[in-house]
Amino acid sequence: MHVISRLKSKCSVAPLELLEFRACLCFSSANTFPAISTPTTKDPTVHPNPETLSQLLNQRPLLSQLKQIHAQVLTHPFSHVSLTDSLIHCYLSTNNLTTARALFDRYPLPSPPTLLWNLMIRACSKLHNSAESTNLFHLMISLNHPIRVVPDKYTFTFLITSCSHQLSKVHGQIVHGMVTRNGYRSNLYVANSFVNMYCVFREMDDAHKVFNEMSERDVFSWTSLICGYAKNGEMGRACEIFGEMPLRNEVSWAVMISGFVADGRYIEALKYFHEMLCDDHKVKPNEAVIVCALSACAHLGASDQGNWIHAWIDKNGILQSSNISTALIDMHAKCGRIDSASRIFTKISEPDVLNFTSIISGLSIHGLGKDALCVFNQMLAANVKPNEVTILGVLNGCSHSGLVEEGSSIFCNMESLWEIVPKIEHYGCYIDLLGRAGYLERAFKVVKCMPIEPDIVIWRALLSACRIHRDADLGERIIVHIEQMGGRGHIGGEVLLSNLHASLGKWDRVAQVRKLMGERKNESTPGCSWIEVNGVVHEFRVADRLHTQIVEIRYKLNEILKRASLGGYVVTTMQVSFDLSEEEKEQAVAWHSEKLAIAFGLMSTEPGTSIRIVKNLRTCEDCHSALKAVSKVYGRVIIVRDRSRFHTFKEGSCSCNDFW
DNA sequence: GTAGGGTTAG
C-alpha cells in the first residue's frame, strides 16, 4: 500500500538529487557521445531541449554520462514524463535498480504504463531469492483507480522467470492458473518460461506436459527441457530429446556437454564436443562449451585432447578470456603439466581471482605448497581478494607440504583479513593440515570446538591422520563419535566404518553396516581410472568387464603383480571390507581400477616411456605399494593423479613420501 | 521477452 500511495502522490524532485548531479554537458553535433565540459565553461542559463536529451538517452549512455543527463532533466522546468521513461530504461540497463526504482516510485499520475511495470518486474526477477517482482506484480494488478493497468504477455514471461528464480512453486502455480484463464498460455515465450520454471522446480512431468501441449516450439523450448533432464541427473532422457530436436544452437550443445561433465561422464562430454565441431550446421563452440570441454579433459587427465583443444583455441583466434585462461590453467595442471599452467598464468597481464585460484590449486595438488604460498602472497600484494576456493587451494598446498604454521595463520585470519567465514570445507582442510603433520590432539580439539557440527568428512580426515600416525586410541574415540551420528553418517561414513571393522576382523559389524547401506539403497562412488593412449581415453572400473581387451589385460595384470612381488610388493588387504577369505580379498584388490589401467598402460606403450593415470578416488594402500614396485621392476615413471594429489612413482618410491 | 558455464577439503 505504501508504494501505491506514493504512486498516487504528486511527483516531486528531491533537492538532494539536484545537488548530486552538478556536472553539465557540452553539446556537439557529432554522432559520438558529447564530451563533458569543465566546470569553468558551465553556463546554467543554457538548457538543452527535451528532444536533445531524449536523443542522448537513446544512445545508451554510460552511467557517468547518464547521471549528467539526469541532472539536466531535473533542472528543467518542462514536464519530463517521456524522459523519465527513458531514464528508467537507461538506469535498468546499467544495472542501477535502486535509482530506477526511485524514479518509478515517483512516477507522475495516473500510473506508469504497462511497459515500465514490465521492465521493473524483469529487473527484479533477476534478483534471486527476492519476492520483489511478485510484490510489484501484485501492486500492478491491485491498481484500479484512476486507471487500471493490464498485464500482458511480457509481464507474464518475466513473472514466471521470477518464480523460477525465487524457487516459489506456490507463486508459479498461481501464475499458471491466471495465464490459463487469460489465454496467454498459447504464447511461445510464456510457454517456454513455464517449461523452464517446472524444470527448475524439478517437476519434469509438468515441464514435459507443458512442452507436449505447445502448438509451436523453438530452440528455447527444446533446450530448456533438455537442461531440465540434465540437471535432474537424467542424461539418458536428455540425449533422446537432443536427438529429436530439429535445430540446435550453441546453448543446446553447452547444456549437453555441461550435463555430462556434471554427471562425471567426461568421455561422453568430449565426444559431444567433437561432434559439435563436425556438425554440418556449423554451430561454433562458445566460451561455456570450451570451458566445459577443458574441464572434461582436466577430470580425465586427457593430456593429448586437452592440448588439442588448446591449439584449437589459438588457431581459431579465440580470445583467452578470464574463464578460458582459468580453464586452461586447470587443465594443464591436472594433466600433470604444471609448467605449462604456470606459463599461461604468467602471460596474463592482470590476473583475477579465478586465475590466481586455479594456479594456486594446481601448484597444491603437485605438492608444491611453497610455490602455492608464494603465488598467494603475490595475489595479496596485487590487491586481489581471495575467495573461499582460493583459501581451500592454499590450505591444501600447506597440508601436503607440512607448512603447519603458514596454513594455521591463513585459516585463523581468513575472516578478519578477507571476510571469508570458514565453512566446513575449510575446517576439513585445517584438520587435515594438523592431523597430517602429527598434531592429532590439536586437530581433535578443533573438531570439538568448531561452530559447525562436524560431518563425516571431518571425522574421516582425523581418522586418516590416525592411520598415518598409527594412533589406535584416538581412532577408537573417533569411531564412537561417528556411531553417535547414527543415520547422519552418510554413505562415506558407512564405508569407512565398515573398512575399519573389517581391518579389525569384526565381520559381524561389517555385515551390519553393509546391510544398512543396502537398505538405504545408497551406492558409494565406484572407483574409476582413466588412461590416455594415443589420444584415446580408456576407462576402467573396479572389477571391470567392459573393456574390449579385458581378458588380455587381466592376464597381463597377473604377470605384473607376480613380478612386482619379486620387487618387494606384498599384498595389503586391510582396506577390503567384505567378509572374504584372504585369497578372495587379494583378488578384490587386484581388480582395483588403477591396477587395470596400469596393466593396459604397460601393454600399450613403449618400454621406458612414462605412464599417466587419473583416478576419481584416493589410491588405496595396496595400489600405492604395487605401483612403487612396478615403477622399479619395469623401469617406468608412473604419474598418478588421485582425488587428493599427484603421485610420481619412480624407482620404487613415490613423490608423496607415502603421505596422502 | 524465454534456455547454458569451472576452479573446491577428504
Image (cartoon, rainbow, N blue to C red):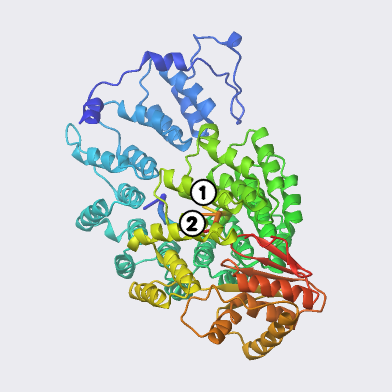
Nearest to N terminus: mark 1 or mark 2: 1
What x and y, as percent, mark residue A465? Answer: 56, 57
Identify the residue position indicated by label 1 in the image: A441
Q: Is residue A432 left or right of residue A501?
A: right
Residue A240 screen position, x and y as percent: 45, 76
**Front residue of A407 and A13:** A407
Could you tell me which residue is drawn at 57 percent across and 48 percent down? A439
Q: Which residue is mark 2?
A: A474
Name the kind of residue labelled 1 in the image. Glu
- Check disc 2 and give the amino acid type: Leu
Quadrant position of the C terminus of chain A in the picture? bottom right
Q: Which quadrant, please, contains the N terminus of chain A?
A: top left
For the residues bearing labels 1 and 2, Cβ distance under 8 angstroms: yes
Comparing A164 with A432, the one in front is A432
Q: Could you tell whether A300 is left or right of A349 in the image?
A: left
**Element on which disc 1 rests:** helix
Task: Confirm whether circles 1 and 2 share one chain.
Answer: yes
